[in-house]
């Protein structure tokens, strides 16, 4: 545990989810593979595109509809819908295909459980502080086993912007009825989590390496504390 700034008293703890509580990469990769297998099988005209071309379309849609950059599910739906239209499918076919694709992706994307040792850390912390989630992703917190250890989980979308924007930090503090300085946020990303939390007036703990076991470079905004494994948080009790 490395301390860069002295922690002040806090009243609640928030966690990023992806790559902080589990290695997110294999689940997203598998979900994407299953999604495009379904699309290519059901709408064969679209099979000429590879993943990079679908991603190009999604990023093009960001320029047309900037709000999609803050909602991963809406962005993926728009990408599928627009892509199927591009390949000559009707509006009804494209809408149905996008809905089928999203159902497939969401099923596989959250088809896992958070490791028992991580849940144990959250449970022990939760005996002393309210625990909440703040994520830029779209994982189903209930399906992966977080409902019993977190009071609520916030996701972006519907006008709520992704971290590092302060929207979700502010919303969490409002729901917890605390000041921003009384929220301690734990996450793996030096920008979204560390800088985002501190710009919102919260305190931050940086998990480095993340659950992918990748070390990330610090940015200009340093956390209050840096840890290399989650159970070190129990020393804060």
Image: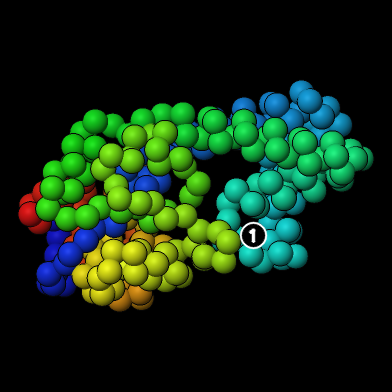
Within the image, what quadrant is residue 170 found in? bottom left
68 left or right of 205?
right
Q: Quadrant of the N terminus?
A: bottom left
Count of labels shown?
1
The structure residue drawn at horizontal position 39% and vertical position 67%, both measured from the top left corner, is: 171
Q: Residue at x 49, y 62 (%)?
A: 162
Residue 223 seen from this side:
no
- Residue in view at x 35 percent, y 74 percent: 200
Looking at the image, residue 33 sits to the left or right of residue 108; the answer is right
* Residue 226 vs residue 137, the one in the foreground: 137
Tell me where residue 14 sits by quadrant. Answer: bottom left
Of 18 and 113, nearer the camera is: 113
* Residue 171 higher or lower than 216, as above or below: below
Horizontal and vertical percent for residue 117?
A: 20, 33
Apparent side of residue 10 relative to residue 188 in the rendered image (left or right)? left
The x, y position of residue 134, in whole percent, is 38, 56
Q: Is residue 163 visible?
A: yes
- For mark 1, give the secondary structure: helix
Residue 139 at what x, y percent from top left? 47, 42
The picture quadrant where one finds residue 86 is top right
Q: Callout 1 environment at 10 Å: few (<14), some (14 to 19), or many (20+)?
A: many
Image height of 196 relative to 33, above or below: below
Task: Give the colour scheme shown.
Answer: rainbow
Residue 123, position as x, y percentages in the image: 18, 42
Q: Which residue matches tag 1?
A: 68
Does 116 sit above or below residue 216? Answer: above
Give the quadrant of the C terminus: bottom left
Question: Residue drawn at (74%, 58%), measured in percent from left and top?
Answer: 60
């Amino acid at each position: 545990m490395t301390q860069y700034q002295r922690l002040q008293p806090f009243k609640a703890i928030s966690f990023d989810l992806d790559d902080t509580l589990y290695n997110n990469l294999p689940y997203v990769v598998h979900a994407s593979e299953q999604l495009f297998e379904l699309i290519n099988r059901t709408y064969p005209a679209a099979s000429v595109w590879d993943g990079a071309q679908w991603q190009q379309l999604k990023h093009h849609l960001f320029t047309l509809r900037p709000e999609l950059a803050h909602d991963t599910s809406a962005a993926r739906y728009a990408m599928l819908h627009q892509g199927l239209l591009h390949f000559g499918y009707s509006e009804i076919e494209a809408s149905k295909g996008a809905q089928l694709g999203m159902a497939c992706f969401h099923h596989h994307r959250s088809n896992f459980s958070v490791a028992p040792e991580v849940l144990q850390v959250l449970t022990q912390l939760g005996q002393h502080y309210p625990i909440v989630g703040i994520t830029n992703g779209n994982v189903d917190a209930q399906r992966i086993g977080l409902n019993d250890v977190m009071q609520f989980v916030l996701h972006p979308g519907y006008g709520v912007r992704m971290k590092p924007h302060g929207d979700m930090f502010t919303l969490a503090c409002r729901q917890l009825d605390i000041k921003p300085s009384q929220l301690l946020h734990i996450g793996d990303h030096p920008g979204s989590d560390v800088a985002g939390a501190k710009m919102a007036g919260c305190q931050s703990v940086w998990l480095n390496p993340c659950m992918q076991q990748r070390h990330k470079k610090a940015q200009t905004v340093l956390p209050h504390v840096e840890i290399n494994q989650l159970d070190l948080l129990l020393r804060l009790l």
